[in-house]
Amino acid sequence: MKTIRLMTFESPVEANLVKGRLENEGIPCFVTNEHFSNLMPHYNRIMDSGVQLMIREIDYQKAVELLELNVEKELVCPQCHSTSIKMSLGKNWFKKLVLISVSLFSGVPFNNINVNYLCKNCQTEFKNI
């Protein structure tokens, strides 16, 4: 029986809430990287880390339907509903570029850099939630 990752979370609290919901519906699951994410939170989202919720492969579709996950969700602008979207560093782009440069030269990630999106039609900046 193959085990796969269903979701990755920033905090163990979120992961355990979803885990409880799945277990209440009869879907066995477990959480990994819980302690590492607490010890080294600056490594979250780097090298595919973070608190991971694992389930059996045969339960994947049921879990996706239960949690109402949109696996292949296309990005849409919340303002004009356009699908013409590009990634952006946001309003603090200079600060983020300096942070990336210092992180690369020192070899230590200082912070998680959240990606924003920019609509090419109406220039609205938003985050994917």
Image (cartoon, rainbow, N blue to C red):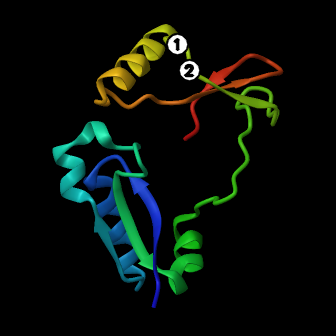
Q: Amino acid at mark 1?
A: Trp
Image x and y of residue 102, in percent = 35, 17
Which residue is found at the position 38% from the left and 66% from the top? 53
Image x and y of residue 1, in percent = 45, 91
Q: Is residue 102 above or below residue 110?
A: above
Which residue is found at the position 69% from the left and 52% from the top? 73
Left or right for 125, reference 5: right
| SS class, disc 2 | loop
Q: Which residue is mark 2?
A: 89
Q: Give the label on residue 30, or none.
A: none
The one nearer the camera, 42 or 74, is 42
Image x and y of residue 44, in percent = 34, 43
Dots 2 and 1: beta carbons under 8 Å?
A: yes
Left or right for 18, reference 116: left
The one nearer the camera, 14 or 114, is 114
Q: Amino acid at mark 2?
A: Leu
Q: Is residue 107 above or below residue 21?
A: above
Q: Which residue is mark 1?
A: 93
Q: Residues within 10 Å of mark 2 (few under 14, many from 20)?
A: some
The one nearer the camera, 67 or 75, is 75
Residue 85: quadrant of the picture: top right
Which residue is found at the position 39% from the left and 71% from the top? 54
Q: Quadrant of the C terminus?
A: top right
Residue 79: quadrant of the picture: top right
Left or right for 35, reference 46: left
Image x and y of residue 67, in percent = 52, 65
Which residue is found at the position 74% from the left and 38% from the top? 76
Q: Is residue 84 above or below residue 93?
A: below
